[in-house]
Image: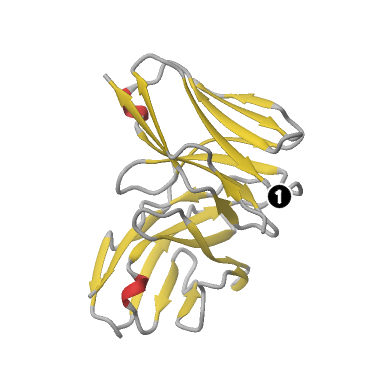
């Protein structure tokens, strides 16, 4: 079946380093993707999104890259800070308007 | 900044009891959603709601579940007869005019514990 999934369940980085979180998707019809950050005990928080007509989109310290050829999505966080520690989910808008979430990657930032 | 709010933050109930989880979506949003997250697992879609009716629902959303928009601001999820496996975080979300391209904003969640 079609799904959204993540390569790495846990990523540990040093404060100040850049982080890269990856996501693979298999639904070639998906045209909208979102990265969410979820801190312990809280709801998913929107970070950045990208549409399929783009390869790259930048926000404040975050960049999302979309490679449609290999159906791969990544989230880059520059100068990672302790406050970035959380679980990061990619999600795609499936048929209709529901979100399909990936399994999540836990980012741990070491001071 | 407008946000989605949910009440209560934590609900404890006995198996077989009915629970109602409440959400206030962002005021000018038109599409509303419920998701759930079992501890340690990914977020799963339950149902979407638009124009006072369900637009999509997942396999999880069986006859025990129902949703309602009782007034102009609240959006509720009712579980008629709770089961142990209903224990999870329940998140409400809303989005604006074009759900296929508009971001869904999530509330802080209600933790449901079924004993």
The answer to whether A52 appears left or right of A65 in the picture is: right
Q: Is residue B64 left or right of residue B11?
A: right
Residue B6's x, y, as percent?
A: 36, 59
Confirm whether residue B28 shows in the render.
no
Rendered position, A84 above or below B79: above
**Residue depicted at 41% across the width and 76% down the height:** B78
Residue A82 drawn at (x, y percent)? 31, 24
Q: Residue at x 56, y 54 (%)?
A: B29
Give the secondary structure at mark 1.
Answer: loop
Specify the quadrant of the image occupied by residue A57: top right
Q: On the rendered image, what quadrant is the N terminus of chain B found in?
A: top left
- The image position of residue B32, as x and y in percent, is 54, 61
Instruction: Tell me what residue is drawn at x 58 percent, y 31 percent.
Output: A74
In the foreground, A77 or B72 = A77
Residue B16 in percent (x, y) is at 30, 85
Please give the count of numbered marks on the rendered protein: 1
Per the image, the residue denoted by label 1 is A27
Q: Quadrant of the C terminus of chain B?
A: bottom left
Color scheme of the displayed model: secondary structure
- Between A9 and A86, the one nearer to me in the picture: A9
Q: Chain of mark 1?
A: A
Placement of A20 over or under B42, stated as above or below: above
Q: Judge whether residue B109 can be spotted in this image.
A: yes
Q: Residues within 10 Å of mark 1 (few under 14, many from 20)?
A: some
């Amino acid at each position: 079946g079609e799904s959204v999934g993540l390569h790495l369940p846990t990523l540990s980085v040093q404060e100040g380093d850049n982080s890269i979180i990856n996501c693979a998707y298999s639904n070639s019809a998906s045209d909208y993707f979102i990265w969410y950050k979820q801190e312990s005990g809280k709801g998913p928080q929107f970070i950045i999104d990208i549409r399929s007509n783009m390869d790259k989109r930048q926000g404040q310290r975050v960049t999302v890259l979309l490679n449609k050829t290999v159906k791969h999505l990544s989230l880059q966080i520059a100068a990672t800070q302790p406050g970035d520690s959380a679980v990061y989910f990619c999600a795609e808008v499936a048929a209709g308007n529901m979100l399909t979430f990936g399994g999540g990657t836990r980012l741990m930032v070491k001071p | 900044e407008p946000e989605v709010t949910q009440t209560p933050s934590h609900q404890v109930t006995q198996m077989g009891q009915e629970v109602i989880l409440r959400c206030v979506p962002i005021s000018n949003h038109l599409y509303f959603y419920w998701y759930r997250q079992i501890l340690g697992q990914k977020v799963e879609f339950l149902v979407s709601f638009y124009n006072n009716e369900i637009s999509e629902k997942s396999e999880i959303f069986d006859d025990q579940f129902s949703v309602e928009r009782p007034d102009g601001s609240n959006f509720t999820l009712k579980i008629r007869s709770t089961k142990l496996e209903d224990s999870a975080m329940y998140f409400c979300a809303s989005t604006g005019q074009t759900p296929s391209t508009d971001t869904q904003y999530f509330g802080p969640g209600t933790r449901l514990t079924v004993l």
